[in-house]
Amino acid sequence: MDQDRPLEKIDVTNSVHGKFDQGCMALYLNEDKIGRIVFTNQGNQYEFAEGFEFDQDKIYQYQRQMETNGKYVEDCDLGWC
């Protein structure tokens, strides 16, 4: 089941770009809006969609680890691989 696989924390900082939008900066990963930075007198406020995190000046995305199949081929002793 997909829910049983552990989450992997992936640094996507270099793939994120921003666009100014009504006093804040909207953040995008590819074409998907993933969050925004709201500029205030008290400092910046970071808001992210579920599955994203801002930590130590980097943006991370949490994804389920891909399921890996241990074998590339089976029955190699038959001589066809």
Image (spheres, rainbow, N blue to C red):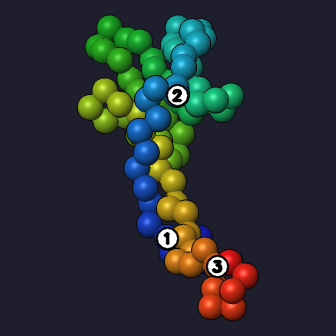
Foreground mark, 1 or 3? 3
Instruction: State left or right for residue 28 relative to residue 55.
Output: right
Q: Secondary structure at mark 1?
A: loop
Q: Quadrant of the N terminus?
A: bottom right
Residue 58 seen: yes
Q: Amino acid at mark 1?
A: Arg
State yes or no: discs 1 and 2 in contact (Cβ < 8 Å).
no
Q: Which residue is mark 2?
A: 15
Q: Residue at x 54, y 39 (%)?
A: 49
Residue 3 seen: no
Q: Earlier in the sequence, mark 1 or mark 2?
A: 1
Instruction: State left or right for residue 69 relative to residue 57.
Output: right
Kindly report the distance in space between the C-alpha atoms of the residues bearing marks 2 and 3.
35 Å
| Residue 28, numbered circle | none
Q: Amino acid at mark 3?
A: Val
40 versus 26 height, above or below: above
Q: Secondary structure at mark 2?
A: helix
Between 25 and 1, the one lying in front of the other is 1
Q: Secondary structure at mark 3?
A: loop
Q: Quadrant of the C terminus?
A: bottom right
Q: Amino acid at mark 2?
A: Ser
Kindly report the distance in space between the C-alpha atoms of the residues bearing marks 1 and 2.
25 Å
Q: How many marks?
A: 3
**Residue 76 at x, y = what percent?**
63, 86
**Residue 2 at x, y = what percent?**
59, 70
Q: Which residue is mark 3?
A: 73
Q: In the picture, residue 8 is in which quadrant?
A: bottom left
Kindly report the distance in space between the C-alpha atoms of the residues bearing marks 1 and 3.
24 Å
1 versus 32 height, above or below: below
Q: Which residue is mark 1?
A: 5
